[in-house]
Amino acid sequence: MEELICYYNGQYLKEDEVKISLWDAGLSIGGVYDAARTYNHVPYFINEHIDRLFRSLRCIHLDIGLSPQEVNNITLEVLKRNNNDLPPDDDFLIIHRITPGVSQGNFNIFTSPTFLINCRHVSPLYEKMTQFYRDGIHLVVVNTRTMPPECLDPKIKHTNRLNNYLAEFEATMIDENAWALMLDIYGRVTEGPRYNCFLVKDNKLFTPRLDNILSGVTRSTVLRLAKEIGIDSIETDLYVYDFYNADEIFITATSFTIYSVTKFNERQMPKPVPGTIADQLLLAFNRLVGVNLVQRASRGLSENNN
């Protein structure tokens, strides 16, 4: 694969041409980011991701001097410049990263913001995606808690993710393939390090409220699709007890959309995966974006192995 083109502070550069300053705030304070993707080469939900990016920017008091529409146009230009490196059965993850810029000797004084947009191929994920679509995942509750909204609102998609890293590490200590489920300081279920969670009980869909989780774009889409196909959805406080007694559990994220849970805390779920509700929602999502994500991953994996 050829080296991909990035957008970096007003320029379109090859990946190895992007140079981040040693004094960039991203290396000490952090910043905000968002991650979208294409489906069959089309950047679905890009407006939703850019809108969330700007909500995060407002919360950290950072003005990048561009409008959402201008960022949208730049994103499409990055995709256009990389289209020749995108095989038919592959797609791109599109990542936006923004920091306050280069420190001027004082943590409150910076140059203009650092803004980077880059693409990554989805195909390197196909092997794991195919496995998880087919077999489900093992979801385990970890001791590492989500950051309380009283300290830093989790609806800001920020780069201060050390607790997420620790949660993932903790999960792999239980099972090298396990996925982490995090609680808040009151014992309520919140989310995973990079994904939202749902459970199904008596054919109703339940998910944590937005007060202490990231407002996932795929989460919102799943709730909308559930309403359209007649599945009742409830946003409420959920506890580990509720997950032990669920008929189905699944997680959602931009990169893979829906993974069903086959084991929860080392206990087998009562029904095979994907569960009935998760399967209906994934099929509805496939119709929306015009591609069967399971077939795309498995077919792309087969072609890459030939």
Image: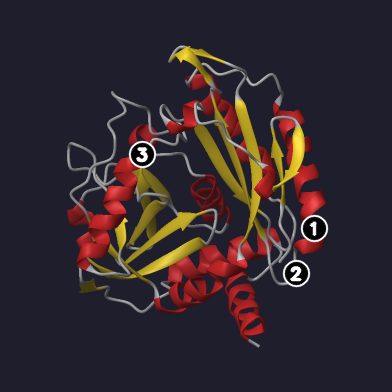
Give the quarter of the figure containing the N terminus.
bottom right
Q: Position of residue 260 (x, y in %)?
A: 40, 68
Q: Secondary structure at mark 2?
A: loop
| Quadrant housing residue 249 | bottom left
Amino acid beneath label 1: Asn
Q: Earlier in the sequence, mark 1 or mark 3?
A: 1
Q: Is residue 248 above or below residue 9?
A: below
Q: How is the image coloured?
A: secondary structure
Q: In 3D space, how far apart are the residues under numbered discs 1 and 3 (Cα atoms)?
A: 38 Å
Left/right placement of residue 97 relative to residue 212 reads: right
- Give the residue at mark 1: 83
Q: Residue at x 22, y 46 (%)?
A: 144
Q: CA distance from mark 2 to mark 1?
A: 8 Å
Are the residues flagged by discs 3 and 2 in contact, CB closer than 8 Å?
no
What's the mark number on residue 87?
2
Marks 1, 3: nearer the viewer: 1
Q: Can the viewer see residue 135?
A: yes
Q: Which mark is residue 209?
A: 3
For disc 2, the neighbor class at 10 Å (few under 14, some 14 to 19, many from 20) is few
* Horizontal side of residue 95 vs 70, given as left or right: left
Q: Position of residue 261 (x, y in %)?
A: 35, 68
